[in-house]
Amino acid sequence: MSVTMETASGVDVLVAGGAAAGLCAAVAARRAGASVRLVEAAPRAFRGGNTRHARNFRIAHDGPAPWVPDTYGEDEFLADLLRVTEGDTDQALARLLIHASTGIAPWLADNGVRLQPLDSGVLPYSRRTVFLLGGGKAMTNALYATAAALGVTVSYGSELVGLRIGPDACAAEIAQDGTTEHVTAKTVVVATGGDQADPEALRAHFGEAAERIVVRGTPYATGRGLRLLHDAGASPMGETGRGHLVAVDARGPHVDGGIVTRITGIPYGIVVDRTGRRLADERADTRRTHYAQWGPRIAACPGQIAYLILDQEGLRRTAPTALPPVTAPTLAELARRLGIDPVALEATLGEFNEAALARQPATRPIRVTPFAAWPLLPGVTFTHVGIAVDGAMRVVMRDGSPAARVYAAGSIMAANVLRRGYLAGLGVTLAAVSGRIAGEKAARHAAD
Ligand SMILES: Cc1cc2nc3c(=O)[nH]c(=O)nc-3n(C[C@H](O)[C@H](O)[C@H](O)COP(=O)(O)OP(=O)(O)OC[C@H]3O[C@@H](n4cnc5c(N)ncnc54)[C@H](O)[C@@H]3O)c2cc1C
């Protein structure tokens, strides 16, 4: 039985969630002169949410910078967003956030985040995205160090579990080690991420397929902050049932596998379900983002499992993965090791090879032994639900009015601009930009 010990304390700005959005909010609010408390649900070793797994973020820029070549204008950024969302976005808010992206790289650098210099030559050319030196883990470590140096009070293993919004202050409940602390804050920034790690939320989004969906990122994205805001009267945003689902190695961990369990070699092989049936044309989309089309296809398979089958030629072209593929000298043996119907697999591959031989050199047959395979499950990055915000990142209530004293930043507000599809590097940009805005506005509001 948990013990409830009640204490009360006060602060100008309370930030819930200690990843990109919450850290940027805390640093910005503290720099604006507010006293700031940041509560992070995860223990210290697992702080930093999904941001720990990120590699790069997208910025608009009018000319070369130390981290990006050429130009990538605000209009081009917006056009890319409109394309992937099929126009289903809040354009005014999108423009505001895209404009703010122009200043976010130097701001992060000024706050200790190290960015990959262009001339290092180790990463793919990208004029749209800046790569984080040391990845998202180094980014969050740097922002935690800056927050601490600025005097932000940080508590780990501390979950926001209650929120009452009052006209003059907010009353928050923070659970830690079976105790509940009551905190009074002049303003609150909720930056607690999405709901993709909550099994019930996943069932609501994806039905029975949810049972086998792997959570690619933090298990602490339980949607608690989202539900607290709903209960406090906030206006929901986005659509249940949509999410970013990718193909991941079925042998990886059920949570927090990150990017190394993602399987990207699909255009070099064939993907079959356990009955040996091919799911779709593997070569129809070979863009770098093709893997995001495969998550939903795998989720629709019997048992939500599929298999990428390659030969040595295909294997040679695939990116390295955390776990090596299953290999076998013959297709029948491979089928046996994977638990696929061997006769059906032979027939499917035979048909593919016949068609490939007819279409050469556009498509190569798969026949250079030993054969290799990865078992695949759908892995969720995020869902497309959240909370409505205005241009100051203030939470919008169901009657359309802005919430007194409550702001939202990061994944929890991403659905305002991203209700479908995805653009590489957009997640961290939205988190950093909205976090910075929310922190500055919350600090100013607290000083009124
Ligand atoms: C494997 C993977 C790779 C990715 N790669 C990229 C990439 O390269 N580029 C990119 O732009 N995006 C990437 N993303 C998406 C990106 O990581 C997220 O969009 C972004 O990090 C969201 O930041 P956030 O601060 O809003 O939320 P999160 O990073 O999800 O963090 C939420 C935080 O809130 C805490 N929390 C949750 N509930 C509570 C509560 N009730 N009280 C207190 N704390 C709470 C959690 O512990 C966590 O620290 C990737 C995601 C994954 C999973």
Image (cartoon, grey):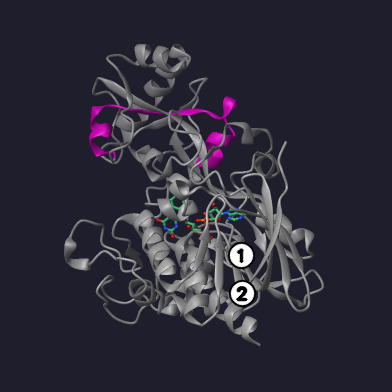
Residue 261 placement (x, y as % from top left): 40, 38
Residue type for callout 2 = Met
Magenta region: 295-318
User: How many marks on residues?
Assistant: 2
Quarter of the image where the C terminus is located: bottom right
Q: Residue furthest right?
A: 399
Marks 1 and 2: CB-CB under 8 Å?
yes
Corner quadrant of residue 143 = bottom left
Residue 77 marker = none
Residue 315 is one of the magenta-drawn residues = yes
Residue 393 marker = 2
The reply to whether residue 239 is in sight is no
Q: Is 60 on the left-hand or right-hand side of 313?
A: right
Residue 413 marker = 1
Quarter of the image where the N terminus is located: top right
Which residue is pictured at 39% across the width and 68% down the height?
146
Which residue is pictured at 68% across the width and 39% down the height?
203
State the residue in front, 88 or 160.
160
State the residue in front, 284 or 36.
36
The reply to whether residue 178 is in sight is yes
Disc 1 within 8 angstroms of ligand 1 (CB): no
